[in-house]
Every structure is written in structure tokens, then in C-alpha cells.
Image (spheres, grey):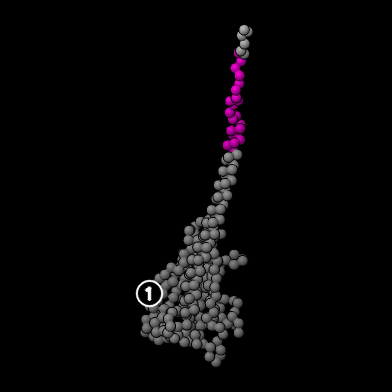
């Protein structure tokens, strides 16, 4: 019986080659690009969410402070023929007599000094001494009744020309219409008596931090106007303040 000869060369059953170095580098680079793209999208999404959250927070905080100021302005007619705005009111400081309640007139009223100091909008109130009747009250300015921080992270707003807008602007009647030109502060006694409208405007930044480089784009500008007298004072004296 013939003997079958076997080849001395072994059969190659399968290919045992792995990835080459170039293939490994290409695969790694592709994975890195995909990962960077995913992280970039995630970072952008988180940044946009934080920006929206900061603006909402700034808007809510600013509106709450604005409502408190407007409430005091709407509660400034505390007795007949009184002058709500006090002399000495400035661009960033409002002096106003205000009191809330159901009485037609008050024997005890408060002088509110609302002013901007180091980025904080502060309300300091002084109770009247009761030594003089309305409208000639005297206030105990040596001993404040209370001091409240209405809002932090406050700055003056800017107009289209990038000029700062006063937080408080005071307007009087010229003829039958409110003047479009604000009175020049600080207000003297006559100017305080003539003040018929007050504009309040300010910019508030997010509570998360005013020093953030992105705080400017996340800030909110707020403005409101309160009319204290709906008609100009008549020469006959029938339209006096708070009459």
C-alpha cells in the first residue's frame, strides 16, 4: 500500500494578524473627535440652561424690588395737601413719605430713603416724631426705624448712547402734559412740590455672582413710572398734592 506523503509546510487555518499602529491611531482619533463633539454639545446646552436660569432669577428678584418701591410710591398720599416727594431727593436717592393702611389720613407716617450703595438698593425708614401735625412732620433721622436691603447686584441702566440712566427721575407738568425733561436733582422744595411723576429704572445681575464675566449678558433691565398727580396744579388751588 503506498504511503501518502505529507507536506512539510503547515496549513494556515486562519489569519492571526491584529490592527496595525496606523489603524489604531485612526480609530483613537475618530473616537476622540466624537467624544469632543458630544462634550461640546453638552457644555453649550448646560451654558444656555444656566444663562436662562440666571436671567429668570434676576428678573424675579428685580421685579420683587420694583414692586416694593412702586407700592411705597402709590402709598405716598398719607394726608390731604401733603407733598409725597421730599426735598433733597437725588438721581440715586429717593426721599418719600409713605404709609400703608385703611385710614383716610395718618398721624404716624414714615420717611423712606431708598438709595443705591455699593451695588445694593437699600430702604431706610424713619418714623415721624409726632411733634407736628400733617403736613409738617418731623422725622427722627438720628435713629432709623429699619434698614432693608431691597436688592443686590444693582447697577444703573444705560441708554442707546451707553450713558448711565439715573435710578430715579422726577417730572413735573408743563401746561397740561407731563414734561419729557426730567428735573435736575437734588430737588429743592419747590421742585419737590411740583413733582408729578417718578421713573424708576435699574439693572440687576444674577444672584449667582456679579463678578462673573458673563453677568452682563445675563442681567435684566427694569423700568417703571408712577404718576403721583394726574392733573397739573390749578391756579385756584383746587388741585393740590394728594387733595
The residue at the point 54 percent across, 64 percent down is 220
What residue do we see at 52% from left, 75% from top?
A: 185
- Work out whether 232 lies above or below 46: below
> Vertical placement of 11 versus 72: above or below?
above
Estimate the x, y position of residue 42 in percent, counting from the top left. Answer: 55, 50
x, y percent for residue 18: 58, 28
Q: Which secondary structure lies at badge 1?
A: loop
Q: Residue furthest top?
A: 1
Classify the position of the N terminus by image quarter.
Answer: top right
Name the foreground residue: 210 vs 56: 56
Residue that carries the numbered disc 1 in the rendered image: 145
Identify the residue at image location x=44%, y=71%.
123
Residue 52 seen: yes
Q: Is residue 30 left or right of residue 111?
A: right
* Residue farthest to the bottom, as pictured: 236
Is residue 95 magenta-colored? no
**Image: 126 above or below 59:** below
Q: Residue at x 53, y 77 (%)?
A: 226
**Bounds of the magenta span?**
8-29
Where residue 214 appears, x then y in whole percent? 54, 56
Amino acid at each position: 500500500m503506498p504511503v501518502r506523503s505529507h507536506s512539510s509546510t503547515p496549513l494556515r487555518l486562519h489569519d492571526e494578524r491584529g490592527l496595525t499602529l496606523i489603524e489604531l491611531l485612526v480609530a483613537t482619533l475618530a473616537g476622540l473627535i466624537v467624544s469632543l463633539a458630544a462634550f461640546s454639545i453638552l457644555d453649550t446646552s448646560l451654558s444656555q440652561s444656566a444663562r436662562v436660569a440666571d436671567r429668570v432669577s434676576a428678573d424675579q428678584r428685580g421685579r420683587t424690588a420694583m414692586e416694593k418701591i412702586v407700592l411705597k410710591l402709590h402709598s405716598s398720599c398719607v394726608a390731604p395737601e401733603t407733598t409725597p416727594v421730599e426735598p433733597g431727593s437725588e438721581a440715586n436717592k429717593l426721599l418719600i413719605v409713605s404709609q400703608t393702611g385703611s385710614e383716610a389720613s395718618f398721624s404716624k407716617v414714615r420717611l423712606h430713603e431708598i438709595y443705591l450703595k455699593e451695588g445694593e438698593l437699600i430702604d431706610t425708614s424713619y418714623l415721624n416724631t409726632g411733634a407736628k401735625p400733617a403736613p409738617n412732620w418731623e422725622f427722627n433721622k438720628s435713629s432709623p426705624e429699619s434698614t432693608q436691603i431691597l436688592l443686590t447686584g444693582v447697577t444703573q441702566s444705560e441708554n442707546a448712547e451707553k450713558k448711565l440712566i439715573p435710578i430715579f427721575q422726577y417730572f413735573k407738568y408743563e401746561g397740561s402734559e407731563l414734561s419729557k425733561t426730567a428735573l435736575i436733582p437734588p430737588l429743592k422744595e419747590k421742585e419737590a412740590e411740583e413733582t408729578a411723576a417718578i421713573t424708576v429704572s435699574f439693572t440687576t445681575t444674577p444672584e449667582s455672582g456679579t463678578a462673573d464675566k458673563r453677568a452682563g449678558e445675563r442681567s435684566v433691565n427694569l423700568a417703571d413710572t408712577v404718576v403721583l398727580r394726574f392733573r397739573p396744579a390749578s391756579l385756584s388751588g383746587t388741585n393740590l398734592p394728594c387733595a
